[in-house]
Every structure is written in C-alpha cells, then in structure tokens.
Amino acid sequence: MSFPISFDPLTYHYASRRNVVYGRNGMVCTGNPLAAQAGLDVLRKGGNAIDAAVAAASTLTVTEPTANGIGSDAFAILYTGGKLYGLNSSGPSPRSISLEEVRSRGFEKMPEDGVIPVNVPGAPGAWAALAQRFGRMPLTESMAAAIGYAEDGYPIQPGVGEGWKASFERCRRAAEKFPEVNSWFETFAPDGRPLKVGELLRLPGHARTLRAIAETNAEEFYRGTLADEIDRFMKQYGGFLSKEDLAAFYPDWVQPLTTDYHGFTVCEIPPNGNGITVLMALNILKGLPESGDLFTQTHRQIEAMKLAFTDAQRYVADPGYMTVTSDQLLSEEYAAARRALIGEEALTPQYWEPVKGGTVYLCTADREGNMVSYIQSNYMGFGSGVVIPGTGISLNNRGANFYLDPSMPNCLGPGKKSYHTIIPGFLMKDGRPVGPFGIMGGFMQPQAHLQVLLSTIDHHLNPQDALDKPRWMWTGGKTIEVEQSFDPAILGQLARAGHQIVVRRSSVPFGRGEIIWRGEDGVLCGGCEMRTDGQAAAW
C-alpha cells in the first residue's frame, strides 16, 4: 500500500463525531463499509431487508475475517409480514466428542485452538434459511458482492488490520501446540506476516466456497464435497467434526424471549444464547425506585448485570440440558429475590472468567417494513485457527465455551449446543417494531445491550449517541473496566462504593454496534458507532 502523501491510518489527533443517518427506502448498518454497501446494493436491485442481511453477512466473512468466517455460527431476529421471528443457527458439538475423550488428551478445560473446540458451523445454513423463507433473491444474487470481493480483492480496513496483528500472534503461538493451526497461515498470512491496513487481499479459495454455497443453497457445505473436505481434514488431525455431523444440521426457527421495560418490549433469542441475561437485568432494574442521580443509576446497572450474568453463566445451556426454565429466570419472583441484594455497596457474586470475542453484527431495513437484526461469529477472532486448505473456511472455536465439569448444565457432551455469547436484539413498542440493535464483543454483549437500551429508553439518546456513550464492563468480582472518556466524577463515586475501577486505553473490549429505528412515518434513523470501521448506509 502506498499513497503520494504519507500518513498513518491508525493515528488520529482530533476527536471525530458521527451523526445519525436518515433514509426512507432502506438502510444497512455494519461494522465494515464494504459490507454495508453490499447490502445496500441488494436493496437497490430489488431485494428486501432479508436479502440485504445475507449480502452483508456473507461479505463480512471476506472483508472482516478477523471476527467471523464461513465456519461461523449465526443468530437473527427479524420482523416481516407483521410478525417477529427468531433464528438460531448455532451448531452442536460433534456426536463423537465426549468429556472423557477430551480429558484423556490431557485437557482440564476445553482448549481454545485447534480441532477439538470446533462445533458444527451454522452461518451458511442461516443464509440459506433466511433466503428461502423470507428473501426475494437467490443466494447467487445476494452473495455476488462477497464472491466478487474474495475473487478480485479488497483493501484491509483499519480495525480489521489491528485484529489481524493480534490474530497472527495468537495463531503463531497456537501452532506450536496444535499443528493443524498452520493451515491458517496459508490463507490469511500468505507472506508469513499479518496483513497491513490498506493492503489488498485476494481469497480465491474463499470465493470458490462462497460460490458453491450460493449455487446449492448451502447443500454443498453440509452434504457435498465441502463437507467431505472438512471431514478429511478433521480425521487427519484427530478432530471430532464429521460429514455426518454436518449433514444432520439445519437451523432452528425459535420464538424470541421478551420483557417489558418502561413502555417498550425488548426481544432476545432464547437459550442456548445468553440474550436472556439482558432481560433478567432489566427485570431487576425496573422494580427499583427511580433516581435522577447518575452515580446511583450506574451503580444499580452494574449490580443488576452482575447478578443476571452470574446466574446466566450457571444455568444457560442447550435447552435440553437446562435445570431451570427461561420462564423461571424471567419471573418476578426471581427478579425480586435478586433485586433485594442490591444496596449501596458493590457486591461480589460468583466469579466469572471474561473472554474476548470475535463477532460481527449487522442490521437492515427496507421500505416495506421488513427489518433484520443479525449476528455472526467464529467466537475468538478467527475462531479455532483451523482453516480447511484451499477453501477459505475458518472454523469456529465455539466449543471452548463448554465446561469439563459434569455438574454444570453447559458441560461438554456429544451433539450438544454450547452456551452462546452472540445476541441480536430487537425493540418493540405497543406491538409495533421500533427496530433492530446489537453490539459485538464476546461477554461484553449483554452488558452493552443493557447500557445502550437504558441510554435510549430512559435518557432519550439518539442511536449514534447511545452507541458512542462511554461504557463500563464487569470482568468479575468487584472489578469494573471503563473507557478513558468515562465521567471521572462518577468513577470516584463508584470507587467509594467499593467498585474496583480499571481504566482501559483501548476501546476494543467494550464492543462495537449498530442500530436502526423506524419512525411512524416509515423514515429510518440509524447509527454505527465510532469504535468500528463501518457505517450506516442509507438509501
């Protein structure tokens, strides 16, 4: 990469502000500008919001592979035809894996790299399911931009470039223990180094795989030669995922969980996703007396999230293995019992181990009223670090979320879905759609959902302002990490209340999100936060 004028794309000396974006015919918000434009182009060509979501999602596997890939999982909430639908396209663990087998290989906890933590990928199945049930275009049209970028090349955006450096170092270390991770370098570091910001990259194998998925509605991936290639690689390196596991997978259509908060209905995907954490925290908060004091509000938010998160970590799992129901976790009895624990001092709930995540979120809307909240993830950056040679398929490491403790509902088992961090959100009012929202970032996601929702509903911030507002993040015990721009006066009060404050220089751990709200007149208003490379693209 070279320009006549010398500059550093990662250094900025002056504060920059994004305004909200308005549109009438359609809107696509993603963390990558090329993916946003791919979705908008589909809307202009006659596709609907569902087609635009597929276009953006498939393009993100190419242009932001540091956070997702063809081997990702996916969840979606969509509003179409006057109804709300949920899609759970997270794959289960392989049917041949077992707690005993993983322990016999010397592991006391699930590894994060290599073939062991790979679950069945769900993203290609999500694209096909969305297009077949609610789309207007075949996948060959909606995925054309993704195929084109992979085939012809594209420039690396700044945020992606930073992620590439971190992933290169992680994969280099992982390859010392797991030789199968060496396959990553062939595709994503062909010159033996991380890609630089602005550098052009071509992914011809990725393009061939995307074309095969598009031409067969993902059948080639789950029940064709691509499945055979995945199976062959897994057998070579002692993995568990097989072509039989892939052939048995289909996404699940689910009913979103909801709770009412101050006149609005907040919607999340049910377990095995942890979106229920947001609803649990809102239920705890709405029973507390109102306060205009910002410190009191922040303290209560933190305490409610601690309690909800602690319980979600204990109980949320594959629904077939949960020991309590979602209804119990969302009951007033539960909320009242947890609410009673909140006082003026910081609590120390059961410790939770934070993990950084790699995820992409996007939302779309069209003139007809269709709206999509969509999230897709390989889990940790590039996922397992395993790439099927010649295909561009980087496989997830979602199985790393399993416990190796048989007393836990989320313990590893064959054909079982793991606790899932990715959560698309949707907001309703009086039975009508307000719009989709979501924030990427591993275990930060429910915490960011809560903060953005409260800023929107209680403080009436516009979508861009609600996303850009400095955030806090609970990381266990009494420790609260905050962004540098967080109000120092409130930080002082939080510290005096017993919270252990850590100020982070980087905003990366605090999530990256997008929002689209629909007005009563059909006008769309969107935001894409400043922590991303992306944009709210309107038509």
Image: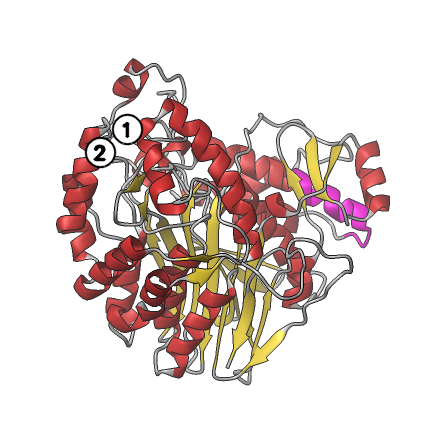
- Residue picked out by circle 1: 413
Q: Nearer the viewer, mark 1 or mark 2?
A: 2
- In this rendered view, identify the residue nearer to me: 273 or 180: 180
Category of crowding for the residue at label 1, using alpha-carbon neighbours closer than 10 angstroms: few (below 14), some (14–19), many (at least 20): many
State the CA–CA distance, disc 1 to disc 2: 18 Å
440 is within the stretch colored magenta: no
Image coordinates for residue 225, horizontal then vertical, percent: 13, 49
Disc nearer the start of the sequence (1/2): 2
| Residue type at numbered disc 2 | Met
- In this rendered view, identify the residue nearer to me: 1 or 227: 1
- The residue at the point 42 percent across, 28 percent down is 174
Would residue 334 be found to the left or right of residue 247 on screen?
right
| Residue type at numbered disc 1 | Gly
Q: Element type at marker 2?
A: helix
Would residue 179 be found to the left or right of residue 231 on screen?
right
Residue 316, placed above or below residue 439: above
- In this rendered view, identify the residue nearer to me: 530 or 473: 530
- Residue picked out by circle 2: 234
300 is within the stretch colored magenta: yes
- In this rendered view, identify the residue nearer to me: 80 or 325: 80
Would residue 280 be found to the left or right of residue 147 on screen?
right
Image coordinates for residue 161, horizontal then vertical, percent: 53, 50
Magenta highlight range: 291-303
